[in-house]
Amino acid sequence: MSLIFDRLRTRGTGGTRRPAAACPYSHAHVHGHLVPEEPPAPAPEQPGTGPQQFTDPRQAAGFIRQFHTEHPAAGDPGPRIRAVLDEIDRTGTYEHTPAELAHGAKLAWRNAARCIGRLYWRSLVVRDLRHLSSADDIAGECFEHLRTATNGGRIRPVVSVFAPDRPGRPAARILNQQLVRYAGHPGPDGRWIGDPAGGQLAARARDLGWKGGEERFEVLPLLVQERPGERPAWYGLPEDTTLEVRLSHPAHPWFAELGLRWYAVPAISDMTLEIGGVHYPTAPFNGWYMGTEIGARNLADADRYDMLATVAGRLGLDTSSERTLWRDRALVELNVAVLHSFEEAGVTMADHHTESGRFLRHIAQEKRAGRPTPADWSWIVPPVSGGLTPVYHRYYDPVDPSLRPAFVAREPW
């Protein structure tokens, strides 16, 4: 899992679902990306405020109160709220303190209803890079983000927060869905070479001058656009930023001959971090993978690498009928290979059974703290053996799409 969520999963409508009788989510995602929660409609203008107001003062005050409630040592929130409201009145927005930014980013993870890995929300490393806004600086720090997160294979959850949108000054955007993603190229026979999910960005990068080849696992360049309507800049990822794991199987030596591999850090880069009414559209973040995200989605989906028939053939399975369950058997072996390979390489990865149990621990901790744990059942239940995991057979607190802080869909320019 990306420990957070994967943007291209189009699994279901969300909300509380029935336990055992419910139909599990069939997430069409590229985990480590997601169909994010929609941001709320803009709040109506406050009486007495001018058109220069850019940030909703109610959201700002609400976040400051929450911050002080969860940090009693910060004292009475009143003076800080008054200072924030005065800053909004004068400038249209306000600036978070480093402590507010760090806590807001962690709360955005805690509030992520589609993430099964929220037990670790306090461990998020928050890189405060709000002073940076140029494409060159953003690209350089994104590369450093990947180095920091990779950590020699012991993956660390990291978010890098760049300059926010301000009145009349929209912040730069990263155009990639993830900092690392494989390119896709349409082949002469109509089949895709590489990852179809990376096809659109690969075409745009080539239009900008990137000399992409025709490889199955070719890392895309990073595209950064500083201003609306401006030509994006592209940057090739340095080799030391992208740890990749070559896949093998503990019982089938032929599996390595398939030439499959996957990258270690799923860093989502096309969502907005929203804290107290301030929007940070350039805030890439990562957790670590859950094995099913790669083995049951990225490599298995028919509109991705579509490897199930190949694996079934090498296993000698009878594919003449769906009733032989050849897809299911091939899928399990593909997931076995992913978990085995990451473990052999010393790269952090969770399995869906262990992570399901940890999510229930998170729910229990939040309950003791007096907080609900909104969860989208269709995203929390894993795409392999869902009914065998404890997250399948229960209800969850309903999802509130207006809950903030949050990672939300980034509004287009």
Image (spheres, rainbow, N blue to C red):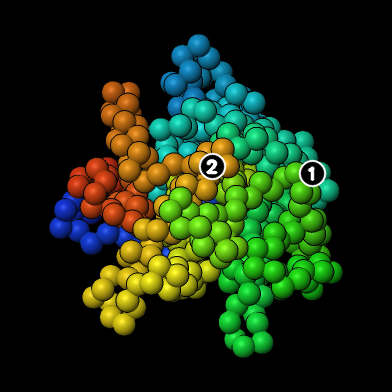
Q: Amino acid at mark 1?
A: Gly
Local crowd at mark 1 within 10 Å, few (<14), some, or many (≥20)? few
**Which of disc 2 and disc 1 is earlier in sequence?**
1
What residue is shown at x 32% (from left), y 76% (from top)?
Answer: 318
63 sits to left or right of 14: right
Residue 371 falls in image quadrant: top left
Q: Which residue is mark 1?
A: 140
* Vertical arrangement, residue 220 with respect to residue 158, above or below: below
141 sits to left or right of 118: right
Residue 12 falls in image quadrant: bottom left
On residue 344, the disc is 2
Q: CA distance from mark 1 to mark 2?
A: 30 Å
Residue 193 falls in image quadrant: bottom right
In this rendering, does residue 193 appear at all?
yes
What residue is shown at x 48% (from left), y 69% (from top)?
Answer: 307
* Vertical arrangement, residue 38 with respect to residue 275, above or below: below
Q: Quadrant of the C terminus?
A: bottom right
* Vertical arrangement, residue 154 with respect to residue 116, above or below: above
Describe the element under mark 1 as helix, strand or loop.
helix
In this rendering, does residue 36 appear at all?
no
Q: Nearer the viewer, residue 116 or 102?
A: 116
280 sits to left or right of 120: right
Describe the element under mark 2 as helix, strand or loop.
helix
Residue farthest along the bottom direction in this orientation: 189
What residue is shown at x 53% (from left), y 45% (from top)?
Answer: 342
Mark 1 in CB contact with mark 2 (< 8 angstroms): no
Q: Amino acid at mark 2?
A: Glu
Task: Tell me where residue 132 appears, x and y as whole percent.
Answer: 78, 40
* Vertical arrangement, residue 70 with respect to residue 382, above or below: above
Task: Tell me where residue 228 appears, x and y as whole percent.
Answer: 74, 61
